[in-house]
Image: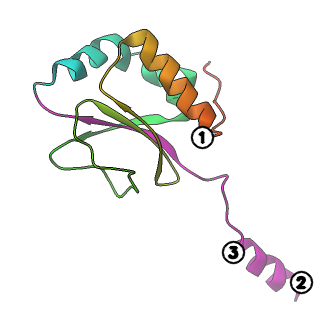
């Protein structure tokens, strides 16, 4: 009886520990700023605390993103959308350059109360 109650409680309790955090990147062929982001950031992104916390997932602006609750449609490339548990929690429209990108992304993560994983 106790085991059944415990199991039912676990199944009915929301679990935020498994919430997935990703950084979606809307891009398109021939996008100068997408290419610039690739040159300046793409190689190091997965090695950073931000990249370990929110893995990058790219999508073509024409085909759209995976099933995510977006605040508004994506109109520009690149657009970076911070998603936590399938919901948009932050957005960067355009690529503001390397220094501003990191600062804005860090602020978005902090504003969404997403803990950073440590880069090793």
The residue mark sitting in front, 1 or 2, is 1
Give yes or no for contact between labels 1 and 2 (Cβ–Cβ under 8 Å): no
Dot 3 lies on which element? helix
Q: How far apart are marks 1 and 2 (CA)?
A: 37 Å
Q: In this view, does 87 lie to the left or right of 37?
A: right
Comparing 16 with 102, the one in front is: 102
Q: Quadrant of residue 91?
A: top left
Question: Which of the two labelled residues, at mark 1 and mark 3, occupies the earlier sequence position?
Answer: 3
Query: What residue do we see at 32% from left, 21% from top?
Result: 95
Please name the residue that numbered disc 3 is placed on: 11
Extreme-right residue of the structure: 2
Please name the residue that numbered disc 2 is placed on: 2
Comparing 50 with 72, the one in front is: 72
Rendered location of residue 106, percent (x, y): 55, 25
- Label 1: few (<14), some or many (≥20) within 10 Å? some
Q: In this view, does 41 lie above or below 10?
A: above
Query: What residue do we see at 32% from left, 53% from top?
Result: 66
Q: Give the range drawn in magenta.
A: 1-29
Please name the residue that numbered disc 1 is placed on: 112
């Amino acid at each position: 009886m106790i085991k059944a109650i415990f199991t039912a409680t676990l199944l009915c309790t929301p679990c935020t520990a498994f919430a997935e955090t990703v950084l979606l990147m809307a891009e398109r062929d021939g996008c100068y700023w997408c290419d610039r982001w690739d040159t300046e950031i793409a190689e190091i992104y997965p090695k950073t605390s931000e990249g370990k916390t929110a893995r990058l997932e790219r999508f073509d602006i024409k085909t759209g993103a995976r099933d995510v609750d977006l605040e508004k449609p994506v109109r520009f490339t690149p657009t970076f959308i911070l998603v936590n548990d399938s919901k948009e929690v932050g957005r960067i429209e355009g690529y503001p350059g390397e220094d501003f990108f990191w600062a804005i992304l860090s602020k978005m993560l902090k504003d969404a109360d997403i803990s950073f994983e440590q880069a090793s």
